[in-house]
Image (cartoon, grey):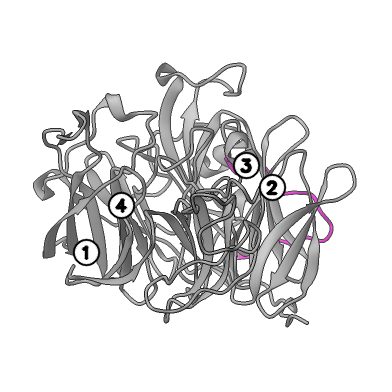
Amino acid sequence: MANQRGIANSGLNRRPIFPAIARALLAALAFTPTARAQNPDLAAPQPPAQNGVAPPSQQSDLIKERFLVSKFPDKPSIPPSFTIPVEPLGYTAPGAIYLGARNSLASLDFLDENHLLFTFRVPGLLHRDLANGQESDERQIRAIVLSLPKGALEADALWTVHDRARYIWMLKDGHFLLRDRNTLFEGDASLALKPVLDFPGPLLWLELDPAQRFMVTNSREPAAKPANSGVPADGSTFAGWKSGAVGSPSTASAAVTTDDDDSTNPPDLVVRILRRDSGRVLLVSRVRSAVHLPINSQGYLENLRGRASDWILNLSFFTGGSRMLGSVNSTCSPTDDFLSEDEIFVTGCGPMGESKLTAVSTAGRILWESQAPSTEIWPQLMIAANGLRLAWETLDTTRSVNSYAPLGVEDIKEQSVTVFDAANGDIALVSPASPILDSGGNVALSPSGRQVAILNAGAIQVFELPAPPPLPVTTGKHQGR
């Protein structure tokens, strides 16, 4: 489980890193691979002998139907290689009351090719805040490590977290990051935790670059004001705000993004880019709303408005300067994610509001495109550690959902997963997922991308796939000026 998303009532119960316009947009966005773009610049599909995956014409009937039309899968397109029942592990499906609340209720991650980390909420009595008589967000999370394929229990722990948003992020070396309140912890297969960073205020969210050298964090840190001054107590203005220490390193002074220039009323949210190994902060700014900031090892990516419905992908280098990587066509403000150091996954809109996905190399070449009906909503994106496969999970609804026709629980038919190759968009697996976890956490890709684990039908189903094709050679590596 690498990356996840949400919609308009985002905040902490959804993925809070999106700009406001992107969060509102996702209420109507969805994805099912429906058609490869007929673009002369796109590479032709590779034969099975070269990439190990059959082209759409040779895939199973279920995959072909899902590739060409919107059809809800009632079973996996291929049988699982093995299953691990979850009831003996203590897992119980959440009640229907949670549907639509976007609470993070479970996580499923590969520690390596032979071990799974499965965490889930432990049902129990609601905690009360004695100070005000309100319900507390404190909850118990059980964490277990399972060996594959037998599912033997190798480690077990009980954690306490204090909100209902996503709490865990997997690292590439068998370690993981756990977020709770102001502190970021690191753990491993033993499930022992050690604090690695402390923030001046509650840490709301984080994301990592593909190489996991850098982190982007959002935290809530109200700025203290002197009694007779309209500026923060440290004497800085909003645009040039300087933070205190995060961990032990000092913080750099730079504006990543600004919503306005009202220095008399500085925002409560702080976005930072940090080096993961040392905690040193490279960029920092106060912002009015939480920010999704896609980064690779060179810099951060932003969308600049071009002519008509064109959007320019602009990479700003950590070392200074920027470079325009290319453009995509979208009728709405698109959202970007780095699948790997050299491939960007852009989620935009087609002319009728349908979800439109574009894979772009950092050299500016469009690798593949797909679009989807609006009956698939609230997408969650999971990326294999090597960037060669991704999983796209959505809620499947009986009708289109938009601001004029909001979602009702009765409109949700199921939750489904589509796994496809990052190099060319070919589909490797389609499967339902149950119970429905609308904040995700029920799908995982192994580091190699050759295994997929899905929480479905009372078990963790593990699928073994052919090796994914390599990414196209790119010449998009550039240094800042």
Q: Which quadrant of the view contains residue 315?
A: bottom right
Q: Which of labels 4 and 3 is toward the front?
A: 3
What type is the residue that disc 1 sits on?
Pro
Give the mark nearest the N terminus, 2 or 4: 4
Q: Residue at x 23, y 53 (%)?
A: 119
In the image, taking residue 466 as reference, residue 296 lies left or right, namely: right
Pointer 1 or 4: first along the chain:
4
The residue indicated by pointer 1 is: 149
Segment colored magenta? 30-47
Q: Quadrant of the N terminus?
A: bottom left
Which residue is under mark 4?
Answer: 107
Q: Do we see residue 424 in this rendering? A: no
Closer to the chain start, of discs 4 and 3, is 3
Which residue matches tag 2?
A: 260
41 in the magenta segment: yes
45 relative position to 277: left or right: right
Q: Amino acid at mark 4?
A: Ser
Measure the alpha-carbon separation of dots 1 and 3.
Answer: 40 Å
